[in-house]
Amino acid sequence: MTRNQNHSFEIFHKVPFYDLDPMQIVWHGNYFNYFENARVALFAHLGVDLFEYYSRTQCLFPIIKTSTKHIYPLRYGDEFICKADVVEGKNKIVVDFEIRLKNDGKLCTRGRTEQIAVKAPEMEIMFAIPDEIRKALGF
């Protein structure tokens, strides 16, 4: 299958004061919020609404693994781009993230999330992403 060419999406954000830690840089846990916002925007761009899909099919997509590499800290008022890129969508959904400063493109953070399909209410793991979602993601 040929992979969808629109498998990436970028969002723009400005660091608010409440995202900072006592060292005046973005607290590490807030990067997952940025990743989530980018993933939701990417999925919407691809026509995927996992909540609607769950409502219709009782299939959940929990995150089972996350990773983050912090390279350069974000500070109050920094404007940045968070890019989400679907890199796998057959047996699990894997999304890679990259955060760069908007003004000069400096790489700040890389991350990854992995999601699987789970059938509710039994909570049985499905060993493949359902066709409708897989195809929308370009796999």
Image (cartoon, rainbow, N blue to C red):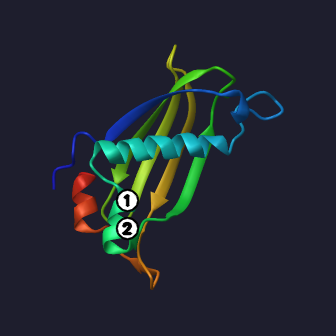
Q: Please report contact status of discs 1 and 2: CB closer than 8 Å, yes or no.
A: yes
Q: Splitting the image into 4 quarters, where does residue 101 fall?
A: top right
Residue at left offset 53%, top offset 25%: 80
Q: Is residue 91 visible?
A: no
Query: Residue 43, relative to residue 103: is it above or below?
Result: below
Query: Residue 28, relative to residue 58: is it above or below?
Result: above
Farthest bottom residue?
122
Disc 1 is placed on an element classified as helix
User: Label for residue 54?
Assistant: 2
Taking the image as shown, residue 43 lies to the left or right of residue 15, namely: left
Q: Is residue 137 visible?
A: yes
Disc 2 is placed on an element classified as helix
Q: Position of residue 112 (x, y in %)?
A: 50, 49
Q: Give the quarter of the figure containing the C terminus.
A: bottom left
Label 1: few (<14), some (14–19) or many (≥20) C-alpha neighbours in 10 Å: some
Residue kind at label 1, given as amino acid type: Leu
Farthest left residue?
1
Residue at left offset 24%, top offset 54%: 136
Q: Between residues 93 and 58, which one lies in front from this camera angle?
A: 58
Q: Position of residue 83 (x, y in %)?
A: 43, 35
User: Label for residue 50?
Assistant: 1
Cα separation between marks 1 and 2: 6 Å
Taking the image as shown, residue 25 lies to the left or right of residue 121, namely: right
